[in-house]
Amino acid sequence: MSQFSLYAVISMLIFSIGLYGFIAHAHLVRKILAVNIMGSAIFLLLISAARRDPTAPPDPVPHAMVLTGIVVSVSFTAFALALTRRIYAETGQAYLPETEPAISAQKQDIVQK
Amino acid sequence: MRGRANITQLWTRVILVVCSVVFGLGLVWTALALPQEATGLARVVKPRMPESGVTNPVTAVLLNFRGYDTLLEIGVLLLAIIAVWSLRLAPTRTALERFMAETPVLAYLVRLLVPVMLLVAGYLTWIGSSRAGGAFQGGAVVAGAGVLLLLAAMVPLPRRRRLLRSLLVMGFGLFLAVAGGMLLLGNNLLEYPPERAYILILAIETLLTVSIGLTLALLFLGVIPEVAAIQQRREDNV
């Protein structure tokens, strides 16, 4: 198994863990974390794919794509977290309406006020 | 319920795990099916390096060969800060700010670290043309210094809207102006003349470092600075 295969397998497994987390967790911060884990897996794949031939110098194009990707994922994370804060400010919890867990009567009272 | 997955039915979760595993194995199979012989773009980039104006291939790809990607990416960053500001989040005081009043250690550390971080950021941006580094690495370090300053509440929040906004837009603005300016010279969009490429890339990278660093630090703050500043003053007066 070459070095690239090892990284490729690991990154795809990490991606699946992120995907599972994204679907299984209802809390929005956990969802954002899960998407970031998926993104990191892709970066790992791209970085390792840049040097599939260990004797040759690494391919600069995937490296540049990862740099671009990191900035985009930071932008996404910041915006998603800001949206979550806004949702929390509006509803008192960090869940989407469809997935929110049963909230206590007391809390519901606060939200309605 | 909090802090744990909210799908309570066991069977739903079992199905989900099975699906994830199958999907993951499919991805692994796909990744392994990739040809081991790299047919990468390194051999396309390498012969054209002298035209790029820089000697670091990653910087050449980012700011010259694939400059369009980078231009749009800075646009995304700018869009993110506009979107976050448009949400009008309520200003919050960090727990660290209260903590700051009790210990001098953090303030001392921040005073020690921030100048060094800015120096490192400048170096990273400068060295980007020939070695590992560049506007994003430098910008990230500037952002780190900014976040430290914000957390430690060592700087008053900027209240001058115009100045702050022009600093945020500056990097994207110059990049776009240079990209469009090339059209006036009869070149394609983002096609720099090889003899001017170095100075253009360096100028773009320098402004980008400031813009990226500031944008990231303000994304961390989340609140429009002058709104937060007004709020803070009001709280202090109470």
Image: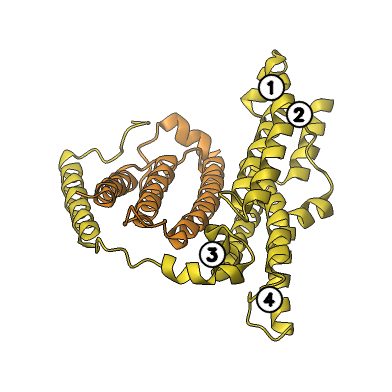
Between B129 and B145, which is closer to the camera in this rendering? B129
Q: Is mark 1 on a helix, strand or loop?
A: helix
Both marks 1 and 3 on one chain: yes
Amino acid residing under circle 1: Leu
- The residue at 24%/51% (across/down) is A5
In the picture, the disc for residue B109 is 1
Tell me which numbered mark, 4 or 3, is placed earlier along the sequence: 3
Which chain corresponds to the colour orange? A
User: What residue is at 36 percent from the left and 55 percent from the top?
Assistant: A51
Disc on the earlier residue, 1 or 2: 1
Task: Residue at 59%, 49% (x, y): give it.
Answer: B133
Q: Is residue B228 left or right of residue A80?
A: right
Q: In which quarter of the image is residue B156?
A: top right
Q: Which chain, by letter, is yellow?
A: B
Of callouts 1 and 3, the N-terminal one: 3
Residue B89 in sight from this viewpoint = no
Compared across the picture, whether B153 is left or right of B130 comes to right
Q: Name the residue under label 2.
A: B154
Q: Which tag, 3 or 2, sits closer to the chain's start? A: 3
Q: Mark 3 points at which residue?
A: B61
